[in-house]
Amino acid sequence: MLTPLLYIADFFSDTTYRAWLKEVNRFIVKKHFLEMPWLLLYIFIIWITTVLLARLFDKLFNQIINSSVKKLQNDPTNYVFLKHFGRAMIYIFGFSIAVWSIPELRAISKSLLAGAGILAVVVGFASQAALANIVSGLFIVIFRPFSVKDHLTIDDTTFGVVEDITLRHTVLRNQENRRIVVPNSIINSKVILNSNLNDLKICKFIEINVAYDTDLDKAIAVMQEEVFNHPYCIDNRKQEDKQAGKHPVMVKVVRLDDYFIRLRAWAWAADNSHAYEMTLDLNKRLVERFREEGIHIPFPIQTLLINPSGASNNAPAQNL
């Protein structure tokens, strides 16, 4: 009885196998696989292999990102960018192999490269935006002005949570669960408000107007009570402020207008999401509480004085 090793050795020494291996070698050396219909099969195999390698690369990197974020609490920004970069390199490498392995295409590419000076200039100008986005993406990953899951406000008009940073663009998710795609070259040149950079705590201004005949001490006490009792409010006082007995919520008079006094409360929350919800809740609660306490919230009133004689020189309108 033959052992497995002896069986394998006997199989490789078989004359039929050696003849088959010789024919396969001749087929490869003479590049018969580059002739129809072998050419189509060859390109199909390269395409399938490239796609499978790209998906395998994605799967492995997703596992690395998930394990790193959950176990090591690492920032996934670098991993996400490298994943897109590696996948792009796999597709470029597969396409290059397919083109370079075909002698006809290789000759054509050589002739095109020999006399493509003007075309290269045109393509260079056309690809400036794409190259700028890639370079800007690298700068974002290196200098880290923001990361994945950060809350960004761009030019005070665009707000969203960073979901992805690719070679070309950055994807933000806004409050309506819609995606905002911003090219890296644009976001890299804009003024960005990052609510998560270095410190997650957020201070929100809770402002409300009161009439001039209002008891300001009472209104300030009501605001301090409502803000401090909100579940998302945190005590951000320094140790010396606590020893001095200062209230956890600071409320000041910030403006004296024609018909109102503006009060502002400094409300602190653990992060931007909690701060936003706290602001909406307090806007509603303060209006209700001021009504309960009889504190008047003024609004402009316009009074028209009409001359009963019907003269053309009517008295001008007065604002109260």
Image (cartoon, rainbow, N blue to C red):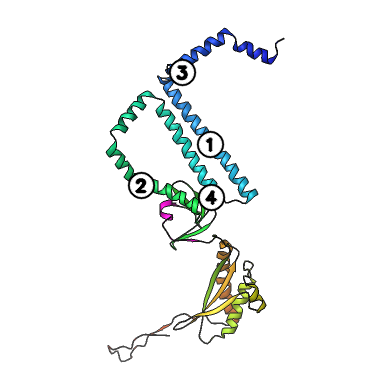
Residue type, numbered disc 3: Ile
Above or below, 218 relative to 82 = below
C-alpha separation, residue under disc 3 versus residue under disc 1 = 28 Å
Question: Which segment did they paint magenta?
Answer: 181-194
* Magenta span contains residue 192: yes
Who comes first in sequence, dot 3 or dot 1?
Answer: 3
Q: Which mark is residue 55?
A: 1
Q: Give the residue displayed 63% in from the left and 74% down from the top.
A: 248
Compare residues 169 and 139 and report the one nearer the observer. Answer: 139
Residue type, numbered disc 2: Gln
Kindly state the secondary structure of the residue where label 3 is placed. Answer: helix
Task: Please provide percent x and percent y for residue 176.
Answer: 50, 57
Task: Please provide percent x and percent y for residue 178.
Answer: 49, 53
Kindly state the secondary structure of the residue where label 1 is placed. Answer: helix
Q: Give the residue displayed 43% in from the left and 48% down from the top.
A: 135
* Foreground tag (1 vs 2): 2
Q: Give the residue displayed 47% in from the left and 28% down from the top.
A: 46
Who comes first in sequence, dot 2 or dot 3?
Answer: 3
Residue type, numbered disc 4: Thr
Q: Which residue is mark 3?
A: 28
Who comes first in sequence, dot 4 or dot 2?
Answer: 4
Residue 178 seen by the camera: no
Q: Which residue is mark 4?
A: 77
C-alpha separation, residue under disc 1 versus residue under disc 2 = 29 Å
Image quarter of the N terminus = top right
Q: Which residue is mark 2?
A: 128
Compare residues 281 and 146 and report the one nearer the observer. Answer: 146
